[in-house]
Amino acid sequence: MQTFLFTDIEGSTRLWESHPEEMRQALQHHDALLRTQVEAAGGQVFKTIGDAFCTVFPEPVAALRASLQIQRALQSQPLTFAGDSELRVRIALHSGAAEARDHDYFGPTLNRVARLLAVGHGGQVLLSETTTSVLGEACPADCTLRDLGQHTLKDIEHPETIYQLCHPQLLSEFPPLRTEPSRRSSLPTPLTSLVGREAERALLCERVPQARLLTLLGAGGTGKTHLALEAAHQLAATAHFLLVLFLGMEEETDPLRLWPLLASQLERLGVALPSPLPGSGPEDIPRRVVAALGRYPTLLVLDNLEQLDNQTLHPILRFLLEQAPSVRLLVTSRRRLSLRGEQVITLSPLSTEAGVALFLERVRQLRPEFEASDETVAQIRTLCQRLDGLPLALEMAAARTGVLSLGQILARIEDRFDLLVNRSKDVPARQLSLHATIEWSYELLSPEAQRFLPLLAVFRGGWCLEAAEAVGGELALDASDELQAASLLVIETTPEPRYRLLEAVRSFARSQLAPEAWDEARQRHAEWYLAQLRQDSPQMKSPRERENILQAMAHLRQTQQLDSLATMLLSQLGYWWVYAGFDEAREQLGGYIDACLAAGAGGETPLSLLAHLLHLELYQQRLESATTWLAKADSLLSASERENNPEWLLALAHWHEKAGQLDEALVLNGRCESHPQTPAHIREQARISQIWTYLRLGRAQEALQQCQQTLTQHLQRTTAPDSQVATLYYLQAIAHLQQEALPAARLLLDKSQAVLDTLRFTSVENIVCSIEATWLLASGHYEAAWERATACLLPLWQQRDFGRVLVCLDTLAAASWLPDRKHLTPGYLRILLAVETLLPYHRTAFERQGTQQLLERVGPLGALPASREELDQLVHALPKA
């Protein structure tokens, strides 16, 4: 892979025509300057076309350095012409393979860099996404790369992110790129036209771009969703927004669900979220979602928020609005949000005339031959008044004209309204009318659809047709079509068909099932999701299936189907680790263990899942909670059986290590490794755990021997380096540091980082960063050691890796023992001692050697932080690199 650097002069034709003689002299200076800088940076000029240069470099950093020097030279000694005209050069960089022939290059890579050059401005340096990725962090000093967003280049099918080189000595502000930015939308397409809302739609389209938060307010069934969708589609076709999202919240009761739902939509649209902070879990999703949204002018339509608790919802919306100024919120709700800056448009029911027009259009979609006499129109007027002008109710009524006359419809609606009001005096009238319409529509369904609709209430968060067939059998396909036609079922067709019920319809459907039938439906639902997980279906890895999987596990737990529940839990372990769903994992695994204990159901599988729960607790430094769970193992399997279970031995070793009982941890890891029934991956984990323990005790030579053996065996089983290889490299580096073998440690750190560069495993990268800081300190590079330790301290704190946090604090305290920074050392030591005291984290005497020496040099430190909250504030307030 090579990096191509193309340049040309902006507006050169105009300059030649207006200043031919000056331009001739300026071009000689321009050509000499560019050729000198390109060759000085190790590049080659392989072609010039007029004033355009085509050059190639073996490395992207060299091309970037040449770009910087060219622009700095041109800006320090600008080539100006009469009339204040100035010669400005634009530069583009792209990396890729190309065919070399006759001292020239050919291929798509050159086409792309030429297209990239064409969208820039004079004085600007643009980089492709590929070059930026290959470049990594290897930027020249004081250089940064600014994300200009995704753009579509001419004749290039897929959009890509374009970056701009920024430097204090370069111009940084330019007009927008000469591209048509990519637009993305998750808006579902309405299946019917909007009738009677033309003025409201125009008002929405006028006010939404100017309002940060606009609430479309109205009673249930007034058509808020349809109107908001139509307005959003119209706005999506304008220049106001590049990203338009629609999020239906009618099924949700927890406002915090907004974040994972948004993350899922962005993922489906191909909008990348920033990487999670090291060690973070679901709590980092809001930051990542807001950062992604903030990169684009975004319209976010949040549909049906009235059921959500404002105390939880308000901070979410405030955070989104404050942190992403480019986002506009269009909310539909039955109540105001009462947030500062909220604008409101109240959507009243349709006027009688508009209601008549809507009813007639829907009837004629079913019966094109329908003619409206004066008597018919009068009946429709009455119907509109009885249904309060609610579009949803009118559409449902129109759907029944194929089997009922208007007189029969009027009679049924009258009966149902009176019946429901009499039974529920405390329910608002409009809600009564909507519920009556749902009930009435249900009774007009075919017997098959009537049997099928209540079964759908078992689903949460949507479902696919195959899931519906598993619950409803052969009824599913035809009955789904009938329910959709009756506006009782919503079908979303992006990216593939999924079905969902409005919450009001779902609640009604649930009420139609007797307890026995409800239990049977939940059992079929759970069995289908269990079967999908057993088959390792890719669909089950999607976050949008979380609600159904959790629903299925809840049923299995409630009905004591513990073997099936264990199967589901084992299938979710990878998901929880990848998506840092630790809280959900702890809740689900804990619930399963409690259920096993209550049922007296022990055995190898419950013990295995308890071992996983212990690892999760200990990974998050929850020693007290882990100890509580540890005590419950006696009820699952006898002591003698546990002693022969490799997974349990590994978990028990982990607990002893976190509790500071390292000798016991070594014994248990050794037993786990040598046990004849230990699987290869568990044996390897036991060895790595043992290596860590050796290092914590200062037994570097034993750690090295174990590392080398484990690495050799691991490489025999794998085809490419993975995170385990990176781990074993940096563990060897730590051992060499303990032996003061600095060159060997440096080599292994570089090897570990090289592997991590291909994996982007952030949590491990932070560990390597902390080890590198220790190496820099041992090498006498105090300033660099301070900067590296500062860079990784907060990420390690957030991923709760307190062992490495303490190493960083030791490094920072020692590296700060300089005249201009000595005042920082006591602060680092106070935090270090507080971590040991409050969390607690048990360090060995070997690990505390450096700390003890510093404490003796520094003297009294004063009061330590008294709480974890105070400690957390102090960590976040430390100086940044």
Image (cartoon, grey):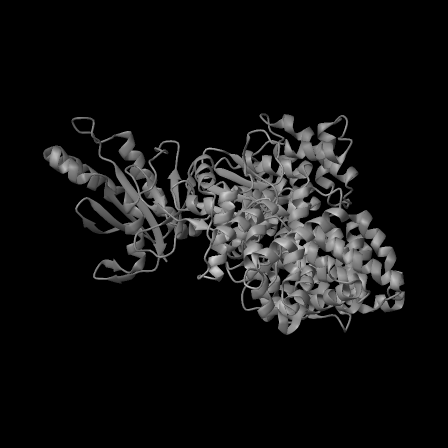
Question: Which quadrant holds residue 531?
Answer: bottom right
Residue 178: image location, x then y, percent: 31, 43
Residue that protrudes farthest toward the left in the picture: 21
Residue that protrudes farthest toward the front in the picture: 375
- Residue drawn at (44%, 47%) of the image: 233
- Residue drawn at (77%, 50%) of the image: 658
Q: In this view, does 84 lie above or below 129?
A: above
- Residue drawn at (73%, 46%) of the image: 421
Residue 207: image location, x then y, percent: 46, 34
Q: Is residue 703 above or below residue 170?
A: below
Question: Which quadrant holds residue 585?
Answer: bottom right
Residue 538: image location, x then y, percent: 58, 66
Question: Which quadrant holds residue 512?
Answer: bottom right
Which quadrant would the N terminus be assigned to in this image? bottom left
Q: Nearer the viewer, residue 655 or 789?
A: 655
Residue 808 seen in the current view: yes
